[in-house]
Amino acid sequence: MKALVRETADVLSAIYEPDGSGFSIEVPLAGDRYQTVSLFLDESTIELLSVVHELDKAAKSTIEKFQKRAKASKVTLEPEPTDGVYRACVRARIDVKHANRAALEPLLVEVASLGDGIERELTGGDVD
């Protein structure tokens, strides 16, 4: 997986680094923006994940709007460990057998774009 992440990051001029059991890629987007997408190997699939933290339940309508824009990914609002606090998760999966740069790149860009759009709409920009 490391070779695939490196190749995809190089094509996108993105920064990548190890992240627990996977990798994180800072995906460059329009307007000099970046969105972190984590990639994890899960048995026979690679999961791509972008998370926007510290939201409230009122974010549900925004999440639904972004889910309608999603082509190959799923957008959900999930509870954080802290009561009353939620997070938006943008996920996509690709079968390891079909995982190459040409297949991974559009998924990576979609997950990053949706995550960034949610972050901008609900938090006003980048949050740490």
Image (tube, grey):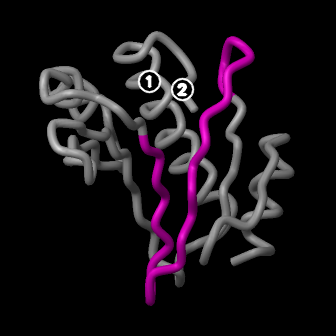
SS at mark 1?
A: helix
Residue at the spot 34% in from the left edge and 46% down from the top edge: 89
The magenta stretch is: 29-51
Asked whether 57 or 46 is in front, the reply is 57
Mark 2, residue position: 127
Is 10 left, or right, of 90 in this rendering? right
User: Pointer 1: what residue?
Assistant: 119
Magenta-drawn stretch contains 86: no
Q: Residue at x 23, y 37 (%)?
A: 85
Asked whether disc 2 touches disc 1, contact meaning CB atoms under 8 Å apart, the reply is: yes
User: For the residue marked with disc 2, what is the amino acid?
Assistant: Val
- Residue at 25%, 46% (x, y): give it: 82
Q: Position of residue 92 (x, y in %)?
A: 40, 57
Most foreground residue, 9 or 58: 58
Quadrant location of residue 13? Answer: top right
> Residue 20: x and y, percent?
62, 72
Q: Is the residue marked by circle 1 packed among few (<14), some (14-19), or many (20+) residues within 10 Å? A: many
Magenta residue check for 40: yes
Residue 69 lies, with reference to residue 2, above or below; the image says above
Identify the image quadrant of residue 7: bottom right
| Amino acid type, callout 1 | Glu
Quadrant hosting residue 44: bottom left
